Amino acid sequence: TVTGVDDNSIDGDVAYTRCHNGIVIERHGGRDGEPCGTDVRVRGLDVERGPGCDCDGGIVTGAASSSDGNYNALAVPDVTVTNDDDDTAGVTVGAISGDTNEGGATATFNVRLTSDPTGDVTMALSSSDTGEGTVSPAALTFGSGDSTWNVDQAVTVTGVDDSTMDGDLAYTIRTGAASSS
């Protein structure tokens, strides 16, 4: 939990608490002449903890404090909040830079994830015809909880001389199903 005061010049300094679960609790004062703390706003933050991570949290209240005996030490119920997840698991594969040839020419493309995974993600790469072209690396791994999940990883495709006069042949670089630990 982080507590502080924003410096938004429009509404003045607003006390807030940012919880570990991506929920921000703001205590706003009323309009001119109204007592401070009449409005509590709860807003979610994008916590990028992977798809399916609906984060629960809430406002834990204390007992009321008042000179009115009817209200002093009155228990106030806590408020539970869920920060709904908007992340979607996915893989982005960029366009290939060109064609390969039997002289060993290379082409490249990039791969990255669309959201921060909750575990490491690995996917195998292979060529549909290793007599025409090869792929390197043979697998990609994206780390969870670090800053590499959304960084492009380069894949290099290299043409192979098959010593056969067979014309231009297409082949495919296969991306295996992503697996996560």
Image (cartoon, rainbow, N blue to C red):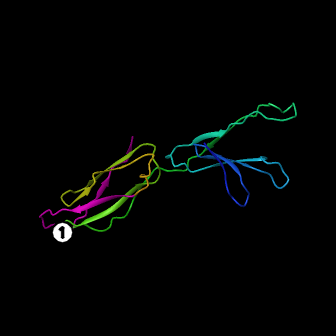
Name the residue furthest left. Answer: 163
Asked whether 170 falls inside the magenta stretch, the response is yes
Q: Residue at x 77, y 31 (%)?
A: 75
**For this rendering, which residue is in front, 164 or 23?**
23
Q: Residue at x 46, y 43 (%)?
A: 118
**For this rendering, which residue is in front, 90 or 108?**
108
Give the left or right position of residue 136, taking residue 80 as reference.
left
Q: Is residue 55 above or below residue 63?
A: below
Q: Residue at x 15, y 64 (%)?
A: 161
Q: Is residue 52 above or below residue 160?
A: above
Magenta: predominant secondary structure element?
loop
Q: Quadrant of residue 112?
A: bottom left
**For this rendering, which residue is in front, 57 or 96?**
57
Q: Which residues are magenta?
A: 152-181
Asked whether 173 falls inside the magenta stretch, the response is yes
Q: Residue at x 20, y 61 (%)?
A: 132
Q: Mark 1 highlights which residue?
A: 167
* Residue 104 % position (x, y): 19, 65
Circle 1 crowding by C-alpha within 10 Å: few under 14, some 14–19, many from 20 = few
Amino acid type of the residue that numbered disc 1 sits on in the rendered structure: Gly
Q: Quarter holding the C terminus?
A: top left
* Residue 109 % position (x, y): 34, 62
**For this rendering, which residue is in front, 123 or 143?**
143
* Residue 171 % position (x, y): 25, 61
Label 1 residue SS: loop
